Amino acid sequence: MKQLNESGFVPIKQQITVLLSSLVLPLSVMAASPANKADTEQIQRGEYLARAGNCMGCHTTRGGKPYAGGRQLNTPFGLFTAPNITPDNETGIGSWNGEDFWQALHYGKGKDGSYLYPVFPYTEYTKITRQDADAIFAYLRSLSPVAQTNPPHKITSPYDNQFLLFLWRTWYFKEGVYEPDHSRSEDWNRGNYLVQGLGHCNACHTPRNVWGASKEDKLAGGEIMGTYWYAPSLISPKEAGVGDWSTDEIVRLLSTGVSAHAVTSGPMATIVRQSLQYLSDDDLRAVAVYLQSLGEKRSDAIPGKIPPMPERVRRYLALGETVYEKRCQDCHGKSGEGVPGVYPSLAGNRSVTMISPLNTVRSVLYGGFPPATAGNPRPYGMPSFQHIIRDQEIAWVVSYIRNAWGNFGSLVSPEDVDSSRGNEF
Amino acid sequence: MKFIVFILSVILSGPAMAQQPAPSGIPDTLEQRVKPCTICHGDEDRAGRDAYYPRIAGKPAGYLFNQLRNFRDGKRYYQAMAILLENLSDEYLLEIAQYFASLKYPYPEPAVNTLSSAEIQSMETLIHSGDPGRDIPACSACHGKALMGVKPYIPSLLGLPHAYVAAQFGGWRNGGIMRGQTPDCMSEIAKKLSQEEVNALAMWLPAQPVTGESAEMEVLSPELVQRCQTIFSREGFPQ
């Protein structure tokens, strides 16, 4: 927020209008003020929407100027660089008009009419209303122009072919603004719009096919392209489905980064810091209502009996227990009970037991803090163990916590630990 | 009536409870919050010179604050620190910097000096007089007579492990520490040193006993402040 304000908030258009009016016809200042007020309101709304859509997440590089682009995303189709979207004439979108912006957001087309790569999530942004798109554009126009040339995309052949992209779009891109479902509540519809459209949660939480397109089972979870993180299913009660959660707890997690039973980590912690913590309570509630409706309820069926463990497995887990007692127990507790809102419980923690152990392994390897937010400004953190213990010990301890205190998950090998390493920095 | 009193007592004790340590005994302190730092940088019991990790206890607060921000913002490259700090705010990093700056842990015994007397002589000249012929200022001109840094932005050079000092010289020489921030005075200086001088400095510095404290800003010459202005970034740091 601070960075945003630094980049100048008074729109240039407004400055010029005021300047001209004061020179030519002083009375017109008064006449112009209601229009200016409307402009200011639109810009403020645009700033809020740009937060909700987390444009900054891609269009600002680490430590870089806000919205000046430069952040790179590595995909199987090539290395993409987010462009400068400040209103600089040469290097940004200074020469764009509202229609150009709408073409990009709604149709996935560049100013020159070329097809944009879906690494820019127009597959979701197409649901954004024209009014919201105009507000975001007005906000971007109000920023101070930053002259910053970013490196071009490095697209792997044959994906640099526009005709292939045309085919891809024909198959996988459905253009259209979000249409409310009148049989549902206003909150539900607003939540749907934010989750499936502006917030583009799909970009991470939906599995992708070999062509990089979202599969039909929306928000069913998958590995995030270009990162070494698994975005859990927002549907399954075995992953991050919140069908059984209260609205309050969902709102708390999304706005502060921690709740009594959960802590955000990895890319989700970043999304909370950059975007979700700035959302209004009403919008977060709407998101919560929509997510609750997606989440499948925990089944009441008697859980399958956990098969007895062979001696070999018991010995493997016992090695993990030794590591746990030495390294983890002080914070996460003797029985993995954790400390609500401070250190997550590991017993019954779905992030620990879900099929992919990737996030748990990465948390042990790299540690991290939940985001510092207004609601949790001084978070407690998790140390990085990559230089403290060997891969074998990490494999033991992750296997142990996946199978202790009633948890049940597959064992993890040192090779799994090694293959979880990835450098996004 | 008893019920009402009970309810009232629950309501009244609510805010008070929040101040207390969590039932598990997790203290509501910065010391507890920075456990992810001290696992490598050491707490009071082992603020030694083991392994690679530099001592951060007692270093000037502005220096620590700038390094924390630089790691987070990709302006000083070290993956482990970048990941750890990614989602922390300037305000919190400042508090963490001030906390470590305030710690007065005892310093470890200096490492054994294995340099020849000729090498020691030339290191002492470099440290206290520099080499004007190559435009290398004395180390003590910026890092203080005691080499314990200058408050609030310049780090101490003593009490650090050999491996860390050697690696930092490598970083300065290949430009990896300031990552394009200019002027990059320390890189310029490190590039003027010969490999033999760098090796000897990395041996000499850890072998010195810590006797003094961080100096005050006034000891710096305006010319050197100008030459190294990047590190005097005051933004967000209380004056």
Image: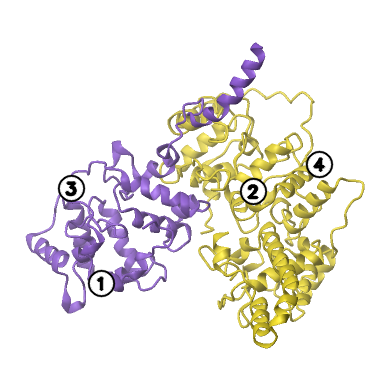
**Neighbourhood count class around disc 4 (C-alpha, 10 Å): few under 14, some 14–19, many 20 upward:** some
Label 1 – label 2 distance at C-alpha: 52 Å
User: Decide: marks 4, 1 in contact (CB < 8 A)?
Assistant: no
Depth check: give the residue in front, A96 or A311: A96
Residue on which disc 3 sits:
B110
Depth check: give the residue in front, A68 or B234: B234
Amino acid on which the number 3 mark rests in the picture: Pro
Amino acid on which the number 4 mark rests in the picture: Ser
- Residue appearing at x 77%, y 60% in the figure: A124
- Image quadrant occupied by the N terminus of chain B: top right
| Chain letter for mark 1 | B
**Neighbourhood count class around disc 2 (C-alpha, 10 Å): few under 14, some 14–19, many 20 upward:** many
> B120 left or right of A150?
left
Amino acid on which the number 1 mark rests in the picture: Pro
User: Decide: marks 2, 3 in contact (CB < 8 A)?
Assistant: no
Quadrant in the picture for residue A51: bottom right
Do the residues marked 1 and 2 share a common chain?
no
| Mark toward the start of the polypeptide (4 vs 2) | 2
Residue found farthest to the right:
A183
Residue found farthest to the left:
B117
**Closer to viewer: mark 1 or mark 3:** 1
- Residue appearing at x 50%, y 46% in the figure: A368
User: Decide: marks 1, 3 in contact (CB < 8 A)?
Assistant: no
| Residue A293: mark in rendering | 4
| Residue B222: mark in rendering | 1
- Residue appearing at x 81%, y 70% in the figure: A167
Does residue B52 lie above or below B138 as drawn? above
Q: Report x, y in % for residue B149.
A: 25, 57
Residue on which disc 2 sits:
A230
